[in-house]
Amino acid sequence: MTVLILSIIGVISGFILFSRVIIKNGVQHYTGNVRVSVIIPARNEEKNLPYLLDSLQKQTYKPYEIIVVDDFSEDSTSEIAKTFGAKVIKNRELPKGWTGKNWALWNGFLESSGDVLIFLDADVRLSPFAVESLLKEQVKVGGAISVIPYHYTDKFYERLALITNILGIFAFTSPFERKSPKGLYGSCIVVDRENYEKVKGHYSVKGELLDDLNLGKKFSDAKINIKNFIGYDLVSFRMYPYGIMSEIQGFSKGAILSANTLSFGTIFLIVLWLLGLVLVGFITPFLVFSHSPIAIFYEIGYLFYTLQILYFTKYTGRFGIFIPIFHFISTAFFILVTLHSFYQVAFKKKVLWKGREISVERRNNV
């Protein structure tokens, strides 16, 4: 009976943490007349870029310029970008004290001339109304906005990210974070040039691994409004289609460090949600197969979590049916990623991403 109560408390915590902060997709056309610079950092992104650049060509509000910063790619990133008419910049040698992505984004900004800047990761895809919808919301906010893309998956290992993905959504949609947001989600950031220059943009966070969260804090500290949204049918991505190791590295590089940025209320509710999830997820199968008389309480709790997860995935990502139902598999993957992240941060003092080792020592993360 106790575990049933814990699972109910956990499920309630999940509903408190999750909010459907969705941008309305093309309900009313954007009537402004601003020049939009899209800036895309790209390191060995020949497989992702065609999808993003094609979606940018289909926008109802056309960007003024699309800038692809080739960050020392060893594939056809530059050639592909040029075939879509993008302006290609070869990134300069990484200076001491900079991380690769921040340096690429800053150099992209220096080559841009738009009134509004849209920073996009290369694995993002946009609906045809995305740019004008993002512009409308940015005008309403009057500062910076970011979007957590809808997470498309195809292969089994990609779907292991289910629980990790949901927890990432919690970190931005929790009422404690929405009330006083301090971080942005780096895959899709929209900000007017004036406010970006006011905080010196990515130059001000040049050595930070968590560039997006730290940039959001710079805006917040400067009294510039920020707001985060869920991508749903507007902005999407497919994060790690080329191997489970890249998936583990990608999630591990910021798992522990990003947790330090959350408010106590968010962390407390996440712990309650995870406690119930772990209890019913890992114990229920054993009790069912052993025909335990207390299995019914665990089964009810398991069912509650399963239905909640299926509801969340409607708005946050496509993970099939098998993994949401057998969610303990994805929970185990999340634990693995967290332990790997802890090992890198606490013992190695560095993380590996896209062939670069990035030190996490003496970084003033938010």
Image (cartoon, rainbow, N blue to C red):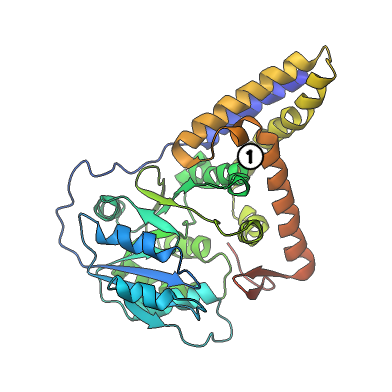
* Viewer-side residue, 73 vs 358: 73
Q: Quadrant of the C terminus?
A: bottom right
Q: Residues within 10 Å of mark 1 (few under 14, many from 20)?
A: many
Residue 293: percent from left, percent from top: 83, 11
Badge 1 amino acid: Ile
Could you say which quadrant of the image residue 20 lies in? Answer: top left
Residue 252: percent from left, percent from top: 66, 58
Q: Is residue 43 visible?
A: yes
Q: Residue at x 54, y 40 (%)?
A: 319
Q: Quadrant of the N terminus?
A: top right
**178 displayed left or right of 207:** left
- Label 1: which residue? 270
* Viewer-side residue, 154 vs 266: 154
Q: Residue at x 47, y 87 (%)?
A: 92
Q: Residue at x 74, y 50 (%)?
A: 336
Numbered marks: total:
1
**9 displayed left or right of 133:** right
Residue 145: percent from left, percent from top: 37, 55
Q: Is residue 304 above or below residue 242?
A: above
Element at label 1: helix
Instruction: Find the residue positioned furthest to the top.
Output: 293
Q: Is residue 305 above or below residue 356?
A: above
**349 displayed left or right of 113:** right
* Viewer-side residue, 203 vs 76: 76
Q: Is residue 203 visible?
A: no
Residue 60: percent from left, percent from top: 20, 54
Q: Residue at x 66, y 69 (%)?
A: 352
